[in-house]
Amino acid sequence: LTVAAVVAGLKNLVPPEAADARDQIWAHSVDTALGARLIADDNGREWSEEAVVAGLLHDCGRLGLLGSETASYVPLFAPGVRPDVETERRVLGVDHQEVGGALLERWGFPEVLRRAAQRHHEDDFTSDAAGLVGAFVVLADCLLSPGRAHDPKVAARRIGLAEDGTEELAVELAGRVANMRQELLAL
């Protein structure tokens, strides 16, 4: 309920001219959450509930930027393409990871969720729960975002998956996430 309230509040801060970007971010966040949970569950790992929440919140900084830097941030989006962190830093002086981490810290969210938001474009996964949950989010994010420059193999290795199976996993995961999304929308 808390996560739903936070996300709904962030979505409501986004002005109408940024609705397309907001909807793109939200759809990606839902897909990443579902994918992270499937990866955790399929591999018999703990923390699958945290993986769902971390997936939902991993791009909350983007929603914050859409609400606060609308005129500068919206032009960075293209249909189906979110801006990369380097472009965000160049144009805005900050990236969505920094903003998301700061928001979650201010709102008192646990470190395992904050770190997933703060570091989901990085490859340095710690050996603790936050590193594992972050790897679930990064792997789902990579596999469900075609054309993303980030390499999913490091996250796969952190989880204990074979690095050479990520292409097959991407196809399988995309299909399963699409089915889950349809089932949720049918409720």
Image (cartoon, helix red, strand yellow):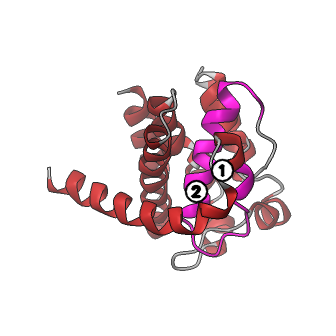
Q: In terms of secondary structure, where does tag 1 sit? A: helix
As drawn, the residue found furthest toward the left would be 187
Image quadrant occupied by the N terminus: top left
Q: Where is residue 185 drawn, in percent x and y?
A: 21, 56
Q: Where is residue 120 drawn, in percent x and y?
A: 69, 48
Q: Quadrant of residue 114?
A: top right
| Left or right, 28 with reference to 4 | right
- The answer to whether residue 16 is visible is no
Of marks 2 and 1, which one's residue comes earlier in the chain? 2
Which class describes the residues within 10 Å of circle 2: few (<14), some (14-19), or many (20+)? many
Figure check: 54 above or below 13: above
Q: Which residue is mark 1?
A: 156
- The answer to whether residue 85 is visible is yes
Q: Which residue is mark 2?
A: 141
Query: How many angstroms separate mark 2 from mark 1 (CA)?
Result: 12 Å
Q: What amino acid is labelled 2 in the image? A: Asp
| Left or right, 5 with reference to 122 | left
**Stretch in magenta:** 126-155
Q: Is residue 143 magenta?
A: yes
Which class describes the residues within 10 Å of circle 1: few (<14), some (14-19), or many (20+)? many
Q: Nearer the viewer, mark 2 or mark 1?
A: 1
